[in-house]
Image: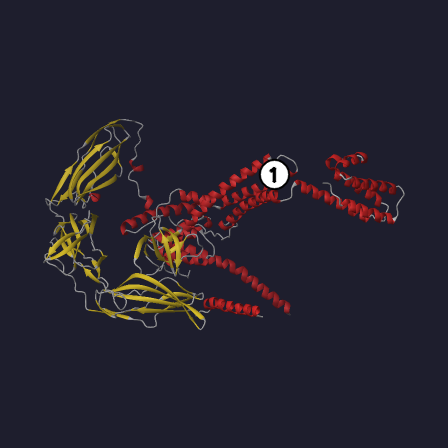
Amino acid sequence: MRRPRLSAVLATTLGVLVLAAPARADVVDDLYERGNAAAAQGEWSLAAGCYEQARALLPDRSAELSYNLGTAYAQLGHTGYAAYHLRRSIQRASDPSAEVVEGARRNLGILDRRIEQDAERTGGQISAPRGWWPRIRSALAARWLAWLTWIFAAGLIASCVVSETWSRKGRSRAIPRAIAWLMAGLFLIGASVHGVALRGERRAAHHVVLPNLALAREGPSAGRSVSVRIVGGSRVRQIQQRGGWTEVRLDSGLTGWLSDDEVADLEAEESVAPVADIPQCPTDR
Amino acid sequence: MSGRFRRRTFVRAAGIAAAGVVVPSVARADDVILKIDLPRSKTAVGRGVYCDVIVEREGGSVKDLGEPDFPELDGLDVSFQGQSFSQSVRIVNGIGTRKSTTTYSYLLVPNEPGTFALDVELEVEINGRTRTLSPATVPKLTATGSAAPVAKRADPSSRPDKADGEVFVWPIASKKKVYVGEQFVYTYELWERTMANVEHKTLPKLKDVYTRELRTPKSIRSEYLDGYRYRVHTILRRAAFAQKAGSLDLGGGTFTVRPSSGIGLFGPPRHSAPYNVEGPSIEIEVLPLPADGRPKDFASGNVGSFTIESSLDRDAIKQGDGVTLTVTIKGKGNIALVGPGAWPDFEGFASYDPKDESEEAIDGDVVGGRRTFEILLVAEEAGRLEVPAVSLSYFNPDKAAYETIESSPHVVEVEADENAVVSRDAEGVEEDSDATLAPPIESTMSRTKQRNPLMTPKRFWWGAGLVPLAATAWFGGGLLWRRFGPSETERAGAALAKAQQQRLARMRKTRGSDAFFENAGEFLHHLAQDWAGPEGKGLPRERLMKVLAKSVADQTRRELASLLELCDLARFGGGGAADHAQVLERVESLAQWRPD
């Protein structure tokens, strides 16, 4: 009598597990398609709402979703949010396709011009344009150089061991010595270059200002006077955080305090809240 | 007894002293209080009041998260003045408590009458939990009266003619009437004869006006009004261009006057509350540009006085080649907005959008400069082509009339070229495609799982740091071993001694057996070789003994020889168990001898 009951429970459990997984994926894809349909009609606000809901349900990253959401925000004039999502879409962690990279770079170029025009109009501050050094620095801070440096270190250690072994056996150790010196040199160069690049990346500006014009204060309080106005979409560097406020620094050296919800970290995985007046995606088909 | 008593007393005293240090830091009551100190609850509109927000903490596990959050109250300006911190320790009945106080000072200035509730909040972390604090009693500030609106001045360009208090603001416009786009000079002066600190709070609002900064004198001049001597500060000077016709209201700014603090002889120093001084706004009349006589090609930004000239970089080209027409407009006015309007029709040429560059120059108080346009003209036809003159129509406000001027025309000789291909449609006027956003992607949405990478910066540094550590240990250990470890001789001696012990042990094991004397003989022979050193290697017994004669004492040598002979005899049939013991004892005794 017990066996049928147990098998029924197992079957039900398995059935729920099997059926639940694709149902979850459908919801996200469905919201994404609704967003695309709204975007095709020019209803950017609704498109952004659908994309935001899809993003909230998606535990992973999606380059296409981030790109579409950023484009929708750009159409709506939310420069900061647009810049944030477009930059996320082309990060290595999102694994973007060539189509996403091309579209995102184009849209980011347009956003950069808008940011400059906004700065001209409002007198706000913006970040300096990124030259070639940040790209090179990113490449040198990548994991491939770290692994290569470790390989050189392992080669150095192995050469030293072989050299000692050959010495005890009475053999000439000129060759392992030469290899050891070469490995040591390569290891030092690799470690130095990678270390400098890592340090540079850590100090780089990878926070984005979200509101179109953010008022950075002199202290971590809304009662403090405004120290600098920053145009949305600008990249800033985080100095410290305190009590719901973040102190940021621009490339020009100007600093100020922004509320935590006014600045987003491109490197962090926690998601940014959607823009306040974005509507919900309708659920009926 | 007395020694023990002294020791006990010392231990007790030390224990009490330690408790006195340890216990106060351990015993703490974690608590925090938020208080607001408002010395005056009533004030007049425009008169400031200082307010302190005091945060008192007891214990060490209370942490402020940010600063007090002042409510946003319409009609009340709140400005942060600074903060101070103090700390104290109180010990009562052996229990110590640490108390710290942070004081945040604010200046409250009401701009309109009303009652303002100062419901300040502060977020703190107590024992790891976040709490929002509010004062037990919310103080209220009541502002009465109304700030009398500062009357507009009838003549915006007039100078002050009477003393108006210790501090007053005086804006000046150089003209009472201007045309749209015509330049006038706006000056903002502060007249004061006070010992107080005067600082600007808001600058004047210059709406519907395009401005350029002019040189502002840094020096302070003195002027007399009604017998009073005033110091006149020029705060700003701007060249302004009105953008809209009608009455232009140039709003007054505001200054804050902070009277000097008095020194309290029997109490803390008194601070007089600051107050605001508002500058009057001035109004000028902006006249629209006359419709009568307006040229058809007139562009609205062309107000001033200008000249125009043009030039070509070449006057002879082949069909299909291009020439650059450079048009330069110079003069006085808002040069960044000046332009010819519609360009003439360049017959026989394909023309492209002009590139322009402005160079502003300010001469005294007059804004001017030059603006240059470069147009690429590509010859589509052969022959003698004329580049027509470019005309510029502008409104001269000094003459209150429109003027039209022209540059000189140019002639280009174009040589025919059958192979020339000029397509006006292909590259005509470039679309501003760069301003159009790329559309969303409609393909299937990909998903990328987040993985924790194996190589992280921290692991890299750990791994990279191990290499120099390993190298240091390797080479350093070798150096130390060579410096402080046993020498070669000592190591060789240790190896020999070890081998000897092994042979001796083997010999002892075979005591009582037939192999005893064989092992004993072998041991003695090796012992002799060890004594002889490298010289004795491989030598037969006789020669070995001769070598030993140089370094071994006679008695020892004879004992060795005797034992060797005994072992030889015993191997071939002699010696019982008693002999084994005796021989063993003699051999062990001999083995302890060491050559010099």
Where residue B278 appears, as percent x and y from the top left, is: 19, 60
Where residue B268 appears, as percent x and y from the top left, is: 28, 67
Q: Residue furthest right?
A: B573
Where residue B53 appears, as percent x and y from the top left, is: 32, 66
Q: Is residue B435 shown to the viewer in this render? A: yes
Give the quadrant of residue B531. top right
> Relative to the observer, which residue lies in front, A86 or B163?
B163
Q: Is residue A273 shown to the viewer in this render? A: no
Give the quadrant of residue B307. top left
Q: Which residue is mark 1?
A: A163
* Above or below B228: residue B428: above
* Above or below B266: residue A184: above
Q: Quadrant of the N terminus of chain A?
A: bottom right
State left or right for residue A154 relative to residue A246: right
Q: Secondary structure at mark 1?
A: helix
Q: Pointer 1 indicates a residue of which chain?
A: A
Q: Amino acid at mark 1?
A: Ser
State left or right for residue B304 relative to residue B68: left
